[in-house]
Image (cartoon, rainbow, N blue to C red):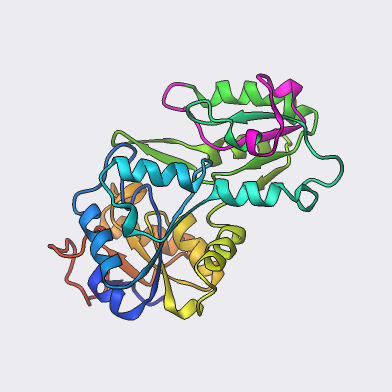
Amino acid sequence: MHNLPEITSLDALSLNYDVFLIDQFGVLRDGEAAYPGAIDALAKLKAKGSKIVILSNSGRSGAYNAERLVTLGFSARSFDYFVTSGDVASSLLKSVDSFLPGKRPSRIFTISSGQDNSLANALDCQSVSSAADADLIIISGSETERISLDSYREILRPAASRGIPCVCTNPDRHKLLNGDIFPSAGALAEIYEDMGGLVTMIGKPYRQIYEYAIAVVGSPPLRSVVAIGDSLGHDIAGARSFGLNSALTRTGVHAHLSESQLFSQMESERIFPNYILPAFVMEGSFKGGRPGTAFR
């Protein structure tokens, strides 16, 4: 039987780790607002001398996401770097032969939220309005709150049938929006694969984003780094695969699960964090147990 994760606090983690890789959505904020206590907790963690990298599965750049955090009340001085899967994708696709052997793409069809074509622009490619006209598909986000999965399937079908390669810059299968959970870009990438399309995933839980983040922060020993996230399948699985310790917050995509349901999911998926954080707060009450006790 796997060792039970320990219920802990940010205070305790700051005594044992120098570098924090912290997820954005589901940890610091929901789709629209900061979680209670998160703004203060991030500032206090930074004030303790921790190196902080916000590590997000977002198709948009770290600079864009950092500005969004600031508009929600977070201080730009409360983190050192903001790394997104979009940043990593942009870096990797500029040496495109490693992903897409053959000619460099020139016409990109992007599925995103808010009609974001920033990756196509960064690659100096033409953005096209139909998947049928593209030689590369980018899936960086979704608008599944208003567009059905069946509709996305039909939008993507012409490219999948032609064998057009796809890069998904946000592997998250679910997203939080106004307290509700909707399918995200990763779910659309799965649809593309189901239709026979070839998809390259960039972001958590895949290795490239961790290599990028660790390099950005100066390549510290992995034992000095802890990753904090809300998703077993992305944040925790990715951290463990890369050799990092991890903490799962009880906010975000698994917040609706009881402790026993969450533990059952851990067992069935064989994905276990080292720690459980009831929430991203520096102090406060801890539901389900006291810091230092085993979670279950």
Residue 296 visible in the snapshot? no
Q: Residue furthest front?
A: 77
Of residue 131 and residue 47, the one placed in the foreground of this image is: 47
Please provide percent x and percent y for residue 197. Answer: 73, 37
The answer to whether residue 145 is magenta is: yes
Relative to 288, 22 lies left or right: right
Query: Residue shown at 23%/72% (left/top)?
Result: 11
Please provide percent x and percent y for residue 240. Answer: 50, 69
Q: Is residue 9 shown above or below 30?
A: below
Of residue 242 and residue 44, the one placed in the foreground of this image is: 44
Of residue 33 and residue 239, the one placed in the foreground of this image is: 33
Extent of the magenta region: 121-146
Quarter holding the C terminus is bottom left
The answer to whether residue 58 is magenta is: no
The image quadrant that residue 198 belongs to is: top right
Relative to 107, 262 lies left or right: left
Query: Residue shown at 46%/28% (left/top)?
Result: 144
Q: Is residue 115 shown above or below 5?
A: above
Please provide percent x and percent y for residue 16. Answer: 33, 80
Of residue 7 and residue 52, the one placed in the foreground of this image is: 52
